[in-house]
Amino acid sequence: MRCLKLFVGVFIFFAALSNAVHAAELPVVFSDDFEQGIDRWEMLDPASWKLAEENGNHVLSQHVKKSSYKPPYRSPFHVALVKDTDVGDFELTARVKSTHKDYAHRDAVLVFGFQNPGQFYYVHFGRKTDPHANQIFVVDDDPRVKISTTTTDGTPWTDDWHTVRVRRTVDDGTIDVFFDDMEKPAMTATDKRFAWGRVGVGTFDDTADWDDVELRGEIVKPTDR
């Protein structure tokens, strides 16, 4: 039994190392520090977003909690998507500052594999974990469903800036999610249903500021929108 556990541990380590090396080799296909504005983004609810300035630095600010956007299924209300960029394998990294008061579901989200408003993945960085918070979800013509295989007890939000990342490998369906610690995933999942799509940032129903977004990936041509 001890040998089996050791073998499994070594296998997981080298699989994670292989994915990390692959991600590092992916070219940068998009980056934005918002010093030139926010025209490279499509907001599902434009009234919720604005270009803001903080100590001379510009950020993408999702500043309105109550949204007029009505998603077709239960899913995030505040989403800003990178325009005209679909990726297969990718690594999306960004800095985020939650601007909402602390509570159990204080959140921010990363969106990926976005086909349309009824089909996409998202990561919910929630303050306290439960079946609807601090998980990886899929929306597939139904209300969001949790697909996380591992997660933490909760995302340790403060009022400061944090770094978040999601890494996706299409062939084996691997999804790794990171919060501040870029070595050990905070969440993992395996799912193969969406092999390409757009990426984005936002919150489920809170507020947050975003900066220094970088997308490494393989550009793909959508087969169906």
Image (spheres, grey):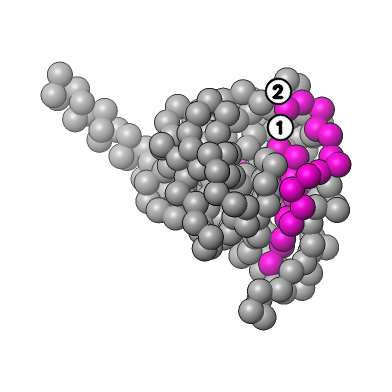
Element at label 2: loop
- Any part of residue 18 in sight: no
Q: Which residue is mark 2?
A: 143
In terms of secondary structure, what is the magenta stretch mainly? loop
Which percent across, then down, holds residue 68? 86, 42
Q: Which residues are magenta?
A: 59-88
- Give the residue drawn at x 15%, y 19%: 1
Which percent across, then down, holds residue 224? 81, 31
Element at label 1: loop
| Residue 156 as seen in the image, left or right of residue 91 | left
- Give the residue drawn at x 52%, y 63%: 160
Labels 2 and 1: the sequence-earlier one:
1
Q: Find the residue positioned furthest to the left.
A: 2
Q: Quadrant of residue 198?
A: top right
Q: Amino acid at mark 2?
A: Pro
127 or 189, which lies in front?
127
Quadrant the C terminus occupies: top right
- Any part of residue 160 in sight: yes
Residue 71 is one of the magenta-drawn residues: yes
- Give the crowd class for mark 1: few <14, some 14-19, many >=20 residues within 10 Å: many
- Give the crowd class for mark 2: few <14, some 14-19, many >=20 residues within 10 Å: some
3 or 98, which lies in front?
98
Q: Is residue 209 above or below residue 42?
A: below
Q: Amino acid at mark 1?
A: Ser
CA–CA distance between discs 2 and 1? 7 Å
- Give the residue drawn at x 40%, y 53%: 181
Q: Is residue 13 above or below residue 216?
A: above
Label disc, if present, on residue 75 of the rendered structure = 1
Which percent across, then down, holds residue 79? 74, 46
- Give the residue drawn at x 56%, y 55%: 93
All told, the count of numbered labels is: 2
Q: Mark 2 and 1 residues: CB-CB less than 8 Å, in contact?
A: yes
